[in-house]
Image (spheres, coloured by chain):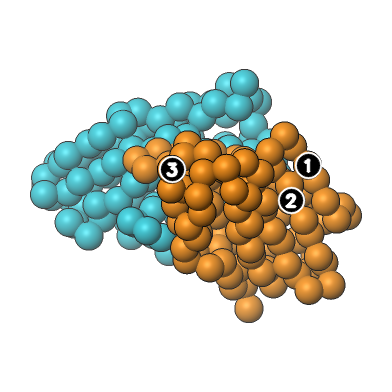
Amino acid sequence: GEDVEQSLFLSVREGDSSVINCTYTDSSSTYLYWYKQEPGAGLQLLTYIFSNMDMKQDQRLTVLLNKKDKHLSLRIADTQTGDSAIYFCAEINNNAGNMLTFGGGTRLMVKP
Amino acid sequence: DTEVTQTPKHLVMGMTNKKSLKCEQHMGHRAMYWYKQKAKKPPELMFVYSYEKLSINESVPSRFSPECPNSSLLNLHLHALQPEDSALYLCASSQDRGGLTYFGNGTRLTVT
């Protein structure tokens, strides 16, 4: 199948860490992405990881990739209210013509 | 510069109107995309242009007509739309199909 799955909702307190999880299906995916969508806005490419990497860190963001389990996670350290948004993971799916296949999105709510 | 610019930001049209959505990128990307996004859902692919040629049409009704006048521009012509076509229309681009994909902020379309 071509399903990319995410939990629907995550609520954290300001200053805590957030971890958003994703499972994907195409073991031959070359890139795996995290996009952020704020209300009324488009999708912002937040970060990405190549499939030959296990981890990528970019300031407050840490992406972990477990290829064996086809599991991707995004950790946001010191979560701020401005991080409140919907986060979509996506893979380039070779079975879908090298097109992006999105998860359903995780709504992150950050409470002050 | 990773900017994809879409105009207009908002559009209200009647079912008998003809209108166009516009998208522009100056990153030298050769693949450009139209996506449709309904509330609280991930984007759905509509069309893919690769090197200015239509390469994927995801069974989109003919009331949506894409056009790629040159490598920087992508249009979506709208005619005789239905209220269920109301959505956020997102344009995206990548260096080639399957590459890092950047999105615009979208056009919020309301069909009355």
Q: Chain of mark 2?
A: A
The residue that appears at 47% across and 66% down in the rendered structure is A8
> Which image quadrant for residue A47?
top right
Which residue position holds label 2? A63
Q: Looking at the picture, how far across and down is residue B104, in whole percent? A: 47, 35
The residue that appears at 37% across and 58% down in the rendered structure is B40
Q: Is residue B90 above or below residue A96?
A: above
Question: Can residue A95 be seen from the camera position used here?
Answer: no
Q: Are marks 3 and 2 on the same chain?
A: yes
| Mark 3: amino acid | Pro
Q: CA distance from mark 3 to mark 2?
A: 25 Å
Q: Which tag, 3 or 1, sits closer to the chain's start?
A: 1
The residue that appears at 72% across and 34% down in the rendered structure is A59
Which residue position holds label 3? A112
Which chain: cyan? B
Which chain: orange? A
Q: Which tag, 3 or 2, sits closer to the chain's start?
A: 2
Which residue position holds label 1? A57
